[in-house]
Amino acid sequence: MGAGAVQGARPIGSGAPERDGDRAAAGWPAPLRPRAGAAPGTATVTVRSPGQWGYRNVVRIRVLVVDDHRIFAESLAAALTAEPDVDVSAAGSGPAALRCLERGAAESRPYDVLLVDADLGAGRPPQPAPLREAAAGVGAPVGAPVDGIALVAGVRAVQPGVRTVVLAERDDPRRAALALQAGAVGWVAKDCSLSRLLTVVRGVLREETHLPPALLTGVLRELTAARKHRSDSERLVESLTPREREVLRCMVAGLGRKAVAERLFLSPHTVRTHMQNVLGKLGVHSTLAAVALARRAGVGPADLAPPSNGVRAG
């Protein structure tokens, strides 16, 4: 196979047999075919031998491209792998990317940089619960579609050492600010030059943060507003009693009134009163709105481990 070619990809019009299991695992309608031993849902691209370039002992940057558009992912992976110090894999969905990151860490070959599509999974069924929770944790509205920004938050939670760069089709200060809050260290237009993208990839490994100059003012404005909203939300949560905060954390965990009563050894009537007090003090009219405000204030879900013995209160 020639240098820079995509390993395992089926040539167009070749009539070669297809493996549906590989396609389904990667989350693409027609994904790259992983080589033997590759993590499920990934496709690895060949890298030129350092000797071909006159280099020795080159430290490779391991990059994972996450995009559910096969042509874009293949093209970007093939372009990046032309660099002697870059090793590229690709995944077609958030869950596939997390599996790939987990496999790399388990094999002591962790990824350095994640390039993730801002609109990953747009128009597709909801992602698994961990990614939905990550989306809510960075301020996304409850019930909103989960995209690449939620994946950024999920990756930061499980592998904080991975540097994440978001690839976007358009400049959007609000979403760029959300990406930074989620843990991204770069926001790059999909139509940027390859040299620009490589500059960003190498720069984030030097602890740099990269944003297009045209976005700076808008992103700073959004981050300032987000801090204000967070401060307001925190003040409202601080107005709750310790018991009301416990109830709120149970609400964030998705527990209903009966489940909260069993969890806290309270009667359903008492829990109903606490929930009404929580909504009133937070100035909202629904459980969903209370959960969204709690997330903005940094309130996490209650620990759902089996509770210790206690006495039911009236």
Image: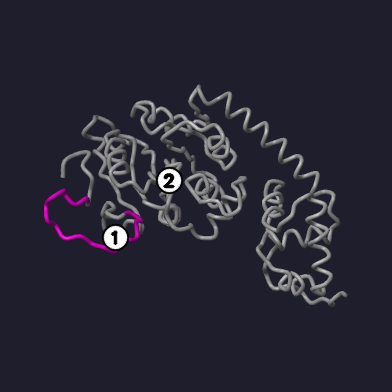
Name the residue at 69% across, 55% down. Answer: 291
Region of the chain picked out in magenta, as a range: 9-28
Name the residue at 30% across, 33% down. Answer: 83
Q: CA distance from mark 1 to mark 2?
A: 21 Å
Q: Which residue is mark 2?
A: 111
Which three-letter amino acid code belongs to the residue tagged 2? Tyr
Q: Are marks 1 and 2 in contact (CB under 8 Å)?
A: no
Q: How is the structure coloured here?
A: one colour
In the picture shown, does residue 162 fall above or below 290?
above
In the picture shown, does residue 152 fall above or below 226?
below
Looking at the image, the residue that sits furthest to the right is 314
Question: Which label is found at residue 22?
Answer: 1
- Magenta stretch mostly in which secondary structure? loop
Q: Nearer the viewer, residue 287 or 254?
A: 287
Name the residue at 33% across, 41% down. Answer: 87
* Disc 2 residue crowd, few under 14, some 14–19, many 20+, Cα 10 Å: many
Position of 138 compared to 258: left or right? left
